[in-house]
Image (spheres, rainbow, N blue to C red):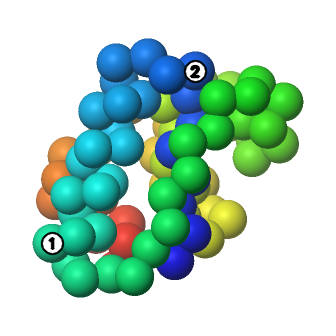
């Protein structure tokens, strides 16, 4: 599973990356996480607000940090 965390490196972006890592580890998912901070790359996903979460090329969350349970649901 390929996971992208989109954002310039702000506190919310870091929090989202931590939440995603915790959720994937709890679910036992084999994953690769990449933090994307380049605005052109972020916009290539169609995301205009950060943080953003993309799972296997599908945008799952924009402009907010979902809860651990929400992220687990997005990764299933």
Badge 2: how crowded within 10 Å, few (<14), some, or many (20+)?
some
Can see residue 50? no
Residue at disc 1, secondary structure: helix
In this picture, is 41 found above or below 74? Answer: above
Tell me how many marks there are.
Answer: 2
Residue bearing the label numbered 2: 8
* Residue situated in front as seen by the camera: 49 or 13: 13
Q: Could you tell me if residue 24 is visible in this image? A: yes
In the image, is 49 to the left or to the right of 74?
right
For residue 62, the mark is none
Decide which of tag 2 and tag 1 comes sooner along the chain. Answer: 2
What residue did someone put label 1 on?
Answer: 26
| Quarter occupied by the C terminus | bottom left
Q: Quadrant of residue 44?
A: top right
Q: Position of residue 9 (x, y in %)?
A: 49, 22
Of residues 70 and 37, the one drawn nearer to the viewer in this rendering: 37
Residue 41, quarter of picture: top right
């Amino acid at each position: 599973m390929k996971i992208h965390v989109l954002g310039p490196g702000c506190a919310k972006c870091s929090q989202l990356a931590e939440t995603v890592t915790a959720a994937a580890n709890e679910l036992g998912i084999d994953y690769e996480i990449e933090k994307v901070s380049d605005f052109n790359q972020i916009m290539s996903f169609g995301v205009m607000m950060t943080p953003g979460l993309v799972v296997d090329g599908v945008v799952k969350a924009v402009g907010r940090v979902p809860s651990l349970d929400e992220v687990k649901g997005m990764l299933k």
